Amino acid sequence: MTYQTHHEAQGAGVVSPEASKAKTISLVLGIIGLFLLGIVLGPIAIMQANKAERLGERATAGKVLGWICTIFGIIGVIFTVIRLVS
């Protein structure tokens, strides 16, 4: 039976700079997407968050913000189309 230290149990390890960069990019794009071009920046934030997670870095905030931006962007497009049609 092997025992893990607290540090190992937390899943902490060496994270590549590329993973940290992808995590930061997803968060920044998610924040910007709340105010500007959410329908474009949201999916990019989600992709960057997924990339960071594949590389071993948690990017939950970037992914959640990306989804929020995407949903708000789609709702905005729907309302704009309805407004233009009627």
Image (cartoon, rainbow, N blue to C red):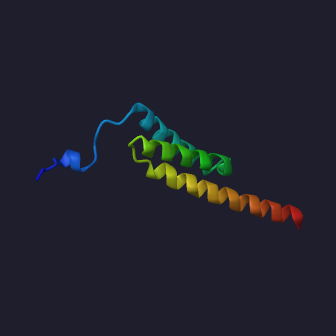
Tell me where residue 25 appears, x and y as whole percent. 52, 39
Residue depicted at x 50% and y 49%: 62
Which residue is at the front of the view, 28 or 53? 53
Quadrant of the rendering where the C terminus is positioned: bottom right
Residue at far front of view: 1
Residue depicted at x 70% and y 62%: 75
Q: Is residue 64 left or right of residue 33?
A: left
Residue at far bottom of view: 86
Residue depicted at x 63% and y 49%: 35
Residue 12 occupies quadrant: top left
Residue at far right of view: 86
Which residue is at the front of the view, 19 or 27? 19
Tell me where residue 9 appears, x and y as whole percent. 22, 50
Tell me where residue 85 appears, x and y as whole percent. 88, 64
Q: Is residue 41 left or right of residue 21?
A: right
Residue at far top of view: 17
